[in-house]
Image (cartoon, helix red, strand yellow):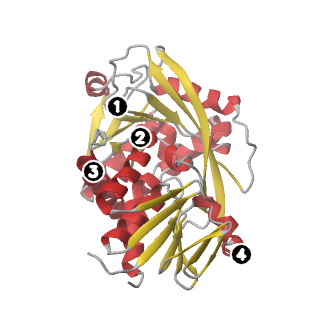
Amino acid sequence: MKNNKSAIVVGAGIVGLATARSLSLRGFQVTIIERTQQAVGASIRNFGMLWPIGQPDGKLYDRALRSKSIWKDIADSIGLWYDELGSLHVAHHQDEWQVLQELYESFKQNGRPVTLLDKHTILEKYNGVNGNGLIGGLYSATETIVDPRVAIPTVAKYLEEYLDVQFVWGKAVTNIISGKVWMGSETLEADIVCICSGADFETLYPQQFRQLPITKCKLQMLRFISNTSTERIGVSLCGGLSLIHYNSFKVSPSLPKLKARYEAELEDYLQLGIHVMVSQNQKGELTVGDSHEYGLTFDPFDKTYINNLIQNYLNQFAVTHNWQLVDSWHGIYPKMTNGDTDVFLQPDKDVYIINGLGGAGMTLSFGFAEECIKVIPG
C-alpha cells in the first residue's frame, strides 16, 4: 500500500526497526537515520529472549504474543535463526516451589501453555540443570530465542530488501522541527518523524525527558561457551530470583514471603537488581545475566563484583563446570519509574517519540509499534 507520504525514524535499534516496519506497511516511504555505522546499543546487548511469560495478562501479554508472531514471520522470510524452545523456572527451595505452583494455577486458568515438572522429568529432559536440591520447575511454551547480535542487523536487511526502507548510517540527528531533521549542516524532510533512539532522545527533547517519570538502567551480562561443543540446554533457564523480577508473577499470593527471604539472605543481589537467566544461541553460546542499576549517570566500567555475584548464583541452579567465559559487557536503556511500560508522545507537529519499553524491547517492540502507528494520521 502506497500513500505518497514519507517518514523518518531516528534510531536503528529494535524500536526503530519495528516502527519502520509498521510505517512501511501503512504505505509510508521510510528512512531510518542511525548515528553509528551499525546498531550497537541495548538492542544487541541483551539475551535475545522473546519473553511473553514476563508480561501480565491483558494488553501486554497480547502485545508480546503479537510481537513474537511478527518476529517469526520476519525470520521465516529471511532465514533468521530462532528457537521456540520455551522457558523453565526452577525451584531449589520450598518457598520457590510454592510460588511456581501458584503461578501454574493462575496461568493455566488464563489459558497460558504452562506445565509443572518434577525433578526427575527436568533432569531427564534438559541438560545443564543443577539437580542438587532441585524440587521442580515451571515450564512455559511461549518463549523464543533469537541472537540479538545477528537478529538486529538481519531485521534491518529485511526492511531494506522487502519493504524498501532506506538507511542513513553514521549520521547523528542534531535537531528536529516539525517534519525537518538536521544532521549537522545536512537536512532531510518528511511528513512525520518518529524518535526511537532509546535514552538518547534526552538530547533532542531534554524538556520532555525531564518532565517524564523516567530514569535509565545499566545492566551487566556475560557470555560463555561450553567445552562440550554439542551440548544444548534445550530451554531458556531461570533461577528463583527471576520470580521477583517480572510483573506477571505478582499474581502469586506467596511471592511477598519469598521476596522477604531474599531480602534477608541475598541483600546484595536485590540492591543491584540481580536475577539470573540463561539463553543459548545457534552456536551454542550461553548468554547469562543480569543486574539492574538505576540512575541518570553511570560508572562506565563494569564491576567484577557484580559479575561474580551473577556467576555464583548461576552455579546454584545450573551445571557450569565446563563453561568458559568469553565476553562481558553492559547495556543502558530508559525505564519508567511510575510503572508505565512505554512512552508515546507528540512533542511537536508531526513528531512522535516512541520509547520507554524498559528491558522488554525485544519482547514488545513490534506489537507496540503497530499500536502507535495505527493512531498516527496518514
What residue sits right under mark 1 in the picture?
Answer: 282
Q: Earlier in the sequence, mark 4 or mark 3?
A: 3
Q: CA distance from mark 3 to mark 1?
A: 16 Å
- Residue 141 lies in quadrant: top left
Pointer 2 with pointer 1, Cβ within 8 A: yes
- Residue 363 lies in quadrant: bottom left
Q: Position of residue 184 (x, y in %)?
A: 68, 66
What residue sits right under mark 3 in the picture?
Answer: 72
Q: Secondary structure at mark 4?
A: helix
Q: CA distance from mark 3 to mark 2?
A: 15 Å
How many numbered discs, if any? 4
Q: Residues within 10 Å of mark 1 (few under 14, many from 20)?
A: few
Residue 33 drawn above or below residue 29: above
Q: Secondary structure at mark 3?
A: helix
Which quadrant does the N terminus fall into?
A: bottom left
The amino acid type of the residue labelled 4 equals Gln
The amino acid type of the residue labelled 3 equals Lys
Pointer 1 with pointer 4, Cβ within 8 A: no
Looking at the image, is mark 4 or mark 2 nearer the viewer? 2
For the point 65% across and 39% down, the residue is: 264
Pointer 4 with pointer 2, Cβ within 8 A: no
Looking at the image, is mark 2 or mark 1 nearer the viewer? 2
- Residue 85 lies in quadrant: top left
Q: CA distance from mark 4 to mark 2?
A: 35 Å
Name the mark on residue 150.
Answer: 2
Pointer 3 with pointer 2, Cβ within 8 A: no
Q: Secondary structure at mark 2?
A: helix
What residue sits right under mark 4 in the picture?
Answer: 207
